[in-house]
Image: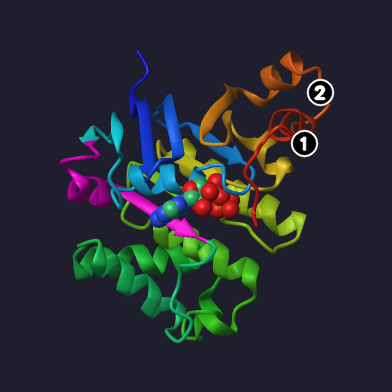
């Protein structure tokens, strides 16, 4: 049977009497690319913070890489990678320094850091930029580097929070090639995005509306069920009834 690396049952997060995440249940399989979609305010970030061991749920259960979100937050953090549009690399450190810094944070030995950083710089074709400040790189390159750094310690799962915001479709496509490569090595990818072309690239997609999961399936199956030509239409059909918005 396929190994489930995220198991979430009736997970709920309440702020006062407001249900930011309302009773969500799902499982993610090892090596899967799992898209986590929803309009602004749907509860994606809140749920993701719980799964990353950064916040406690109000009720329900969840395990990530086999560790419990209530009692094993430290173990969760050691077994995952995380990348967001907002927090990723240090702009005033060089490419190499960033890689070395994160390798150290994740407890890799100097020898391993050295070997893997040389390999990474070669794979990314960043030999000439290795000693440049990250702040000088184009956004698309920063994102690719941030992703590589997030999986540098070979985590079981990588969480990507709107990783490709602000770049063009071609650069996004290149970024997704890297996601596929990581997934092929067995890393599970949990990704939030606002781009519906990216939703099509996921193995399965869940769509949250006002704290609840309204749909969860492969993009093709969702398109069939909603008689939609693309994920944009599926998303629109589900999200148009949302009461929350991004105000
Ligand atoms: N600490 C908090 N206290 C009170 N309400 C909160 C808190 N954190 C989030 N919320 C509310 O919970 C809801 C869900 O927010 P969340 O950030 O999880 O949504 P999201 O789906 O990630 O949206 P976005 O795409 O805009 O990031 C929002 O209405 C938000 O205002």
Most foreground residue, 96 or 156: 156
Q: Which residues are magenta?
A: 68-84
At 65% from the left edge and 75% from the top edge, which residue is drawn? Answer: 138
**Circle 2: is it few (<14), some (14-19), or many (20+) Cα within 10 Å?**
some
Per the image, is 140 magenta? no
Identified at 48% across, 31% down, the residue is 32
Which part of the image, by quadrant, shows the C terminus? bottom right
Residue behind label 1 places its C-beta within 8 angstroms of ligand 1: no
Q: How far is disc 2 from disc 1 in space, using C-alphas?
A: 8 Å
Colouring:
rainbow
Mark 1 lies on a secondary structure that is helix
Q: Are marks 2 and 1 in contact (CB under 8 Å)?
A: yes
Q: Which residue is mark 1?
A: 232
Name the quadrant containing residue 107: bottom left
Q: For the view shown, which residue lies furthest in the left direction?
A: 71
Residue 161 appears in the figure: no
Residue 42 at x, y = what percent?
Answer: 56, 42
Residue 240's spot in the image, x, y percent? 74, 35
């Amino acid at each position: 049977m396929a190994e489930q690396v995220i198991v979430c049952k009736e997970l709920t997060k309440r702020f006062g009497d407001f249900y930011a995440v309302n009773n969500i249940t799902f499982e993610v399989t090892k090596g899967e690319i799992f898209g986590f979609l929803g309009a602004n305010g749907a509860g994606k970030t809140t749920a993701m913070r719980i799964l990353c061991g950064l916040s406690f749920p109000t009720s329900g259960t969840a395990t990530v890489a086999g560790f419990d979100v209530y009692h094993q937050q430290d173990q969760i953090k050691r077994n995952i990678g995380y990348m967001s549009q907002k927090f990723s690399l240090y702009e005033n450190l060089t490419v190499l320094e960033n890689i070395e810094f994160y390798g150290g944070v994740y407890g890799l030995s100097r020898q391993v850091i050295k070997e893997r950083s040389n390999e990474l710089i070669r794979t990314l074709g960043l030999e000439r930029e290795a000693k440049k400040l990250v702040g000088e790189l184009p956004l698309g390159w920063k994102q690719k580097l941030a992703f590589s750094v997030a999986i540098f310690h070979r985590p079981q799962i990588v969480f990507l929070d709107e990783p490709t915001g602000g770049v063009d479709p071609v650069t996004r496509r290149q970024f997704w090639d890297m996601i596929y490569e990581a997934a092929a090595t067995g890393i599970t990818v949990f990704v939030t995005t606002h781009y519906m072309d990216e939703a099509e690239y996921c193995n399965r997609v869940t769509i949250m509306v006002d704290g609840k999961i309204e749909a969860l399936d492969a993009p093709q199956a969702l398109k069939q069920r909603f008689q939609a030509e693309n994920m944009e239409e599926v998303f629109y059909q589900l999200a148009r009834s949302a009461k929350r918005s991004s105000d």
